[in-house]
Amino acid sequence: MESQYIRASKNRGELTRRELIELGVVDKKLKIRTENDDLLIPVLKHIEGYDIGIGDFEEVIIERSPAQILGFSPAYEQIGDIAIIDRNQPQAQEVAKVLLKQNRIKTVLQAETSVTGEYRTRSVSVLAGEKRTETLYRENECRYRLDLSKVYFTPRLSTERMRIADKIKDGDKVVDMFAGVGPFSILIAKKFPSAQVIAIEKNPDAVRYLKENVKLNRVKNVKIIDGDAREAVKEISGADHVIMNLPHTSIEFLEAAFGILKNGGIIHFYAMAHENDLFDGILKRIEEVAGHSGLQIVPLDKRIVRPYAPYQFNICIDFQVFSTAMSSKS
Ligand SMILES: C[S@@+](CC[C@H](N)C(=O)[O-])C[C@H]1O[C@@H](n2cnc3c(N)ncnc32)[C@H](O)[C@@H]1O
């Protein structure tokens, strides 16, 4: 489309663009282009003191969001180039068609069940696009290959994973008791090359991806233990941190976690809680299990990680663990 433009030399290009934006004359419906080493900035009117001309410019295509196109906000998650629509989402076929037109979405799945069972997986069906359930997902500068029909994964924990990683120090021994495809373990290993990370996982498919993701991210400090966390802990001791990201049943593994922690070590404990009793009930149960093991706990932090279901929240409590025998001596 033909428009008047202002020409700016390469070294003044960005400055001129900002000046013109402040003057409110840049035509934002047209794309800025370069000619030789100059920037041609389409403008709505002539401004004294600038080098003006007339030329052809491409129009900016403003992509409308799925909600704008559909007239309602569909419930879905995007993981890599796959969108996965909530199992209760009405008009799923129509939503899938719209999502497929979005940048980067190549496949649209629909969840057919909730996340369930020991391995925390869900059944999915392909609604549109390429017929696959495997994708490559990027988070916190790490890459994860994973199959959404075979392993647990949610991008909604991305900030939480970074928050935990920020609590680790180089040289720490960190045990990720329910590692999945590795998003806590690999992030920590990458951030702290001298940390010693032990990733335990029972689902054989998740273990396969965990191994692949360790290679993909070129981390050398993750030891993978393939099997049940209760068995795996028998070969571990002296941990500085234990991550227990199995919110529905973490409490059943707490005694095992206590057994591998050094005195003063920290547990990052995930659970599901009702909004009427977010932390106190769970803290009491943790204290009971600690008491049976001759330990006492000192809560360091407690927070809501994300809403999970009506009135239910995924929470995390970080606490330090001390031997009562040692503390009564000191
Ligand atoms: C909620 S997912 C969390 C995975 C990972 N931490 C993440 O953020 O993606 C829990 C993981 O624990 C694994 N798991 C369940 N029971 C286990 C057990 N007894 N021992 C080891 N892993 C187990 C599941 O297969 C699943 O991958």
Image (tube, rainbow, N blue to C red):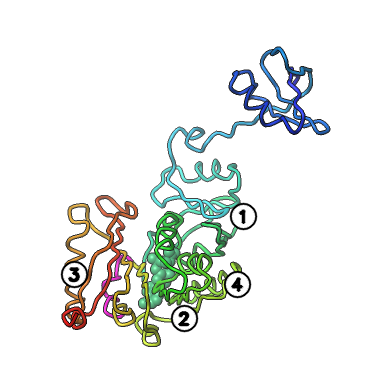
Dot 1 falls on a residue whose secondary structure is: loop
Q: How many marks?
A: 4
Dot 2 falls on a residue whose secondary structure is: strand
User: Quick check: is the Cβ at mark 3 less than 8 Å away from ligand 1?
Assistant: no
Horizontally, residue 178 falls left or right of residue 207, namely: left
The x and y percentages for residue 99 are 54, 44
Quadrant for residue 201, please give it: bottom left
Q: Which residue is mark 3?
A: 285
Which label belongs to residue 190? none
Q: Is there CB contact under 8 Å for labels 2 and 3? A: no
Q: Is there CB contact under 8 Å for labels 4 and 1? A: no
Which dot, 1 or 3, sits closer to the camera?
3
Dot 4 falls on a residue whose secondary structure is: helix
The x and y percentages for residue 273 are 24, 58
> Reading the chain from its start, which is encountered first: label 4 or label 1?
1
Dot 3 falls on a residue whose secondary structure is: helix
Q: Which residue is mark 1?
A: 130
Which label belongs to residue 215? 4
Q: Residue furthest front?
A: 330
Which dot, 4 or 1, sits closer to the camera?
4
Give neighbour class at mark 1: few <14, some 14-19, many 20+ (Cα, 10 Å): some
Quarter of the figure that contains the N terminus: top right
Amino acid carrying label 1: it is Glu
Horizontally, residue 47 falls left or right of residue 321, namely: right
Front residue of this view, candidates 156 and 92: 156
Which segment is the magenta one?
Answer: 247-256
Amino acid carrying label 2: it is Asp
Vertical arrangement, residue 305 with respect to residue 222, above or below: above
> Reading the chain from its start, which is encountered first: label 1 or label 2?
1
